[in-house]
Amino acid sequence: MTPNAGTAQASPSQTLSRGIRALEILAEAQQPLTIAELADAMGVHRSVAYRILRTLEDHSLLVRDDGGRVQPGPGLAVLARGVSRDLQSAALPELTQLANSLTMSAFVAVWDREECVTLVTVDPRHSGAAVVQHPGSRHPISAGAPGIAIQSAFAEDQWEALVPGIPYRAEAAEARRLGYAASHDEVIAGVSSVAVPLRVPGGRPAALAVVYIRAAQDPAEVAGSLTAAARRIEAQLG
Amino acid sequence: MTPNAGTAQASPSQTLSRGIRALEILAEAQQPLTIAELADAMGVHRSVAYRILRTLEDHSLLVRDDGGRVQPGPGLAVLARGVSRDLQSAALPELTQLANSLTMSAFVAVWDREECVTLVTVDPRHSGAAVVQHPGSRHPISAGAPGIAIQSAFAEDQWEALVPGIPYRAEAAEARRLGYAASHDEVIAGVSSVAVPLRVPGGRPAALAVVYIRAAQDPAEVAGSLTAAARRIEAQLG
DNA sequence: ATTATGTGTTCGATTATAGAACACGCATAT
DNA sequence: ATATGCGTGTTCTATAATCGAACACATAAT
């Protein structure tokens, strides 16, 4: 067998890549898996998976339940703490402010190739039927206002050079002029979203966004609050 | 050189262990590092670090800034999303409730050997000088009410068998009787904390806790709210 | 009893990895 | 201009880490 045959990403380091895949599979699976199941999902021999899992367990990146099944461990939360830490800290109070004053869920998402990843979220205090937007969730960048806002941080030709294969949405060009993006029904039916681009020095393009059940809300007005908050966040990040 | 010589943890898989160490170093460093710096911190040859970093980058576990320096990437947030997901979901609304009704920061921490890791936190709505307790932060289990509450989930002899070297605190035995733990000044000066143990089926022992600036608060009363919330969370996890 | 399914361990052949050496870009100092 | 230092990225071969089969063992279902 040639090295890395068939794997989608021909990463230079096989063992490390497999270990990460194990974590990815575990995170995606909504339940604990047996080592055998995981080995099968990874397409490797059980003893290989076993050794990898032992290593991951040593670092608390996974833990075992009573039956010996494996699931993501607390070490991952520690590692994730370092992701755009400055942005997280700077954004949190502004998100709280936005969520409560607009009565909407507010969050920050960052660019990750053809997707965007939600980083921090704050639900409004009376979070009854609030739209749940968990940290760590991925979305295609082509769907929803946050994705458009992130695309709008690039010019069209820049984007096509960086992420070939993913089209540059016409809405992004418009958002580039307006300074904000709005969407309806794109990610979840009946849910609207407004987002503004967020520029972090030395970090990836991100978006500051809110989601809400469709109502008589003027996107431009919401965008005003978002832009003001984004300015404050960017100012704090120097 | 003998395999894994000198490394604190003699994990079975060297490459994977090194990759994780790279992530740990990055998460701890408050700033982006050059590859050379990271290689130095890892104690490996630069080309080794380079290959490892490329692999991590492929999986979005790290990203590079303009100068080529590396920092934690959004993929980590995705992986962390899977950590005790059920507990996170079940606890979030209860945390919000607690934070706002008690005007304290509320959070859930889980056991991790001789430490505990904060998973989810909710600050009260008027989060002025609220005590900041970020998700993903580690604390020695020997300091603070959450640690005591977690220890109290074990009997003393159980604990000593599981985590040799870390003493079983006398307060844990007391908390075992009372059903809650309280601490003052242990982690941060002037800050008090109350915590109750949280038992998750198939998961590790955890704690539900609040922190507040010292005031005329009766710990027992606060513990009542915590216990009620903990019961509801546990009931939902069935 | 027997079968099935799981974890954990050992061990030799093989292969993925380690680490030196090199090419190159880009600052800043000389 | 030239030199020097510091950084990334690439190539290559000996070596050591890894792979994966085979085995021992525990547990639950048949």
Image (spheres, coloured by chain):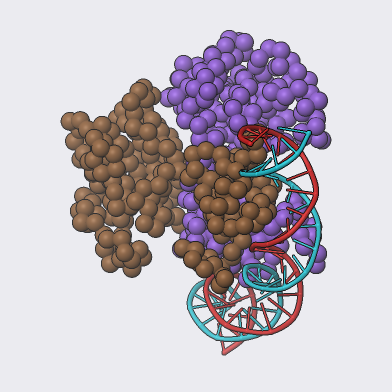
Chain colours: A purple, B brown, C red, D cyan
Give whichever of D1, B50 is nearer the camera.
Answer: D1
Quick check: B142 left or right of A237? left
Quick check: B128 left or right of B223? right
Q: Is residue A17 visible?
A: no
Q: Position of residue A65 (x, y in %)?
A: 48, 60
Q: Position of residue B83 (x, y in %)?
A: 51, 48
**How many numbered marks, from 0 up?**
0
Q: Position of residue A229 (x, y in %)?
A: 52, 17
Give whichever of B6, D19 is nearer the camera.
Answer: B6
Q: Is residue C28 above or below residue A23?
A: above
Give whichever of B146, B114 is nearer the camera.
Answer: B114
Q: Is residue C26 above or below residue A61?
A: above
Q: Is residue A13 visible?
A: yes
Instruction: Give the residue displayed 61% in from the left and 61% down from the top.
Output: B15
Query: Splitting the image into 4 quarters, where does residue A167 fall?
Result: top right
The quadrant the N terminus of chain B occupies is bottom right
Instruction: Give the residue displayed 78% in from the left and 20% down from the top.
Output: A170
